[in-house]
Image (spheres, rainbow, N blue to C red):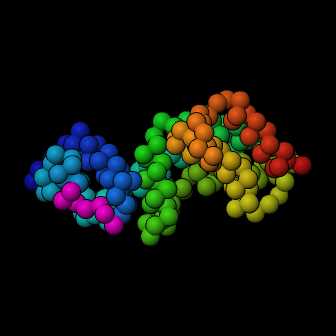
Amino acid sequence: MRTRDTHKEEIVKQKAIEMLVKLGIEGFGMNRLAKESGVSVATLYIYYTDKEDLIKKIGIQIGQDFFNEMVKDFSPTMPFKDGLRKQWENRARFTIKYPLNVACWELLSHSSYRDCILEKSLLDFKTIMGDFLKNAIDKKELVCMPKEVFWSIAYGPLYTLLRFHNEGKSMAGTPFTLTKEVTDEAFELVIKALTP
């Protein structure tokens, strides 16, 4: 039996992410992945049982990497404004550093793979963020609202600005780069909307 080559495995993962983003799930195939990665199809089956297994594992890994990044220097006991700012910093850093991974995550989290990858990626993060929101509400630093409303207000503006940044232009088509000043302005407006 052949052994795993971690270098080849990383190449396969990166090529798979690139192909999923470029071709979508329907256009993605193991034969083409093998060719793009410079490995045999048999090599792929050392790492993954099939296409479904590969896609799930890649989605879970991206999710775990993303959510691990979200909790860097973050604590659920932080004051709400400080904690949310840290979340913005962590999310922006990851999104700018790994745009293909984020694009792949978006694709997979809006697909039939969603439940599987979220379930296996979010375990600890859900608890940490739930505690953070509960603490902020208990300390009267956050208005009580449904989680979906919170997420839309708290992170929607950031992700819109990050999308403009990654595309290099605003909705009007003018050049756009996310700056600290723009980020701070948006953040302060979000804080006004979320705090009593």
Dominant secondary structure (helix, strand or loop) of the stretch shown in magenta: helix
Query: Where is residue 70 shown, x and y percent of the image?
Result: 58, 42
What residue appears at the point 70 percent right and 34 percent down from the top-left corner?
A: 182
Q: Nearer the viewer, residue 169 or 190?
A: 169
Q: Position of residue 68 (x, y in %)?
A: 52, 43
Q: Quadrant of residue 14?
A: top left
Q: Report whether 88 appears left or right of 122.
A: right
Which of these two is toward me, 184 or 67? 184
Q: Is residue 89 above or below residue 150?
A: above
Image spot of residue 152 (x, y percent): 70, 56
> Could one spot residue 69 in this view of the protein?
no
Residue at the limit of the structure toward the front, as seen here: 173
In the picture, measured across the screen, residue 68 lies left or right of residue 179, that is left
Question: In this orientation, which residue lies closer to the viewer: 52 or 74?
Answer: 52
Residue at 12%, 52% in the rendered image:
40
Residue at image point 35% right, 50% down: 17
Magenta-tinted stretch: 26-32
Identify the residue shown where x is 23% and y is 54%: 33
Please indicate, yes or no, whether residue 12 appears anywhere in the rendered image: yes
The tally of labels here is 0
